[in-house]
Image (cartoon, helix red, strand yellow):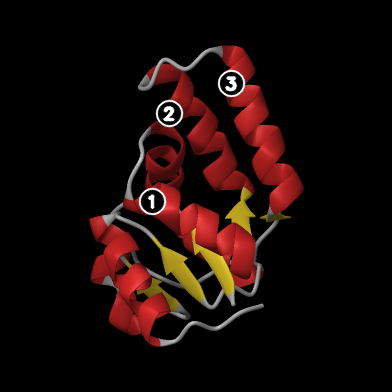
Amino acid sequence: MKVALDTNVLVSAFATRGLCADLLHVILAEHQLIVGATVLTELRRVLRDKIKAPAEIIQETDAFLRSEALVIERAPVLAVKLRDKSDIPVLAEAVGGGANVLVTGDRDLLDIASNAPLRILTPRGFWEQLRIEPTHG
């Protein structure tokens, strides 16, 4: 399964132990990780400005994701309406990467899940989905 992760999930995965870190581990081991260029840019900013991670850690995190994930640099234009317009490229890059699911904690994205061009789930919802349908690949 191709799985796109939003910035908030990646920040949690790298900055804390818990569900998001476990999800990232499973996705890297059993699925294909899709990460958009927009998400990588946001991740670097959040790690620098909010987490106060050292520059070396930020560079290592970026390099790790670029080596382990399919990075989507360009994405199709999507005709979707979102409250937060900065979420549109995140969704477009997930779709452009052929993701089956976008995992996010972002309420604006979760609110449009029923009308989105791919499944949008919370980290907990995706974890539960994996337990029901453990699809590999």
Residue 28 percent coordinates (x, y): 61, 58
Residue nearest the viewer, comparing 123 with 36: 123
Confirm whether residue 125 shows in the render: yes
User: Which label number is shown at residue 86?
Assistant: none
Evaluate if marks 3 and 1 touch, with contact meaning CB atoms under 8 Å apart: no
Name the amino acid, label 2: Val
Name the amino acid, label 3: Ile
User: Which label number is shown at residue 57?
Assistant: 3
Residue 77 quadrant? bottom right
- Residue furthest bottom in the image: 133
State the separation of the CA atoms marked 3 and 2: 12 Å
Residue nearest the viewer, comparing 2 with 42: 2
**Which circle, 3 or 2, is nearer the viewer?**
3
The residue lying at 30 percent from left, 83 percent from top is 114
The residue lying at 36 percent from left, 40 percent from top is 17
- Where is mark 1, residue-wise? 20
- Residue furthest right in the image: 67
- Where is mark 2, residue-wise? 46
In the image, residue 32 sits, relative to residue 100, either above or below, namely: above
Q: Earlier in the sequence, mark 1 or mark 2?
A: 1
Residue 136 quadrant? bottom right
Query: Which quadrant would the N terminus be assigned to in this image?
Result: bottom right
Q: Residues within 10 Å of mark 2 (few under 14, many from 20)?
A: some
Residue nearest the viewer, comparing 33 with 80: 33
Name the amino acid, label 1: Cys
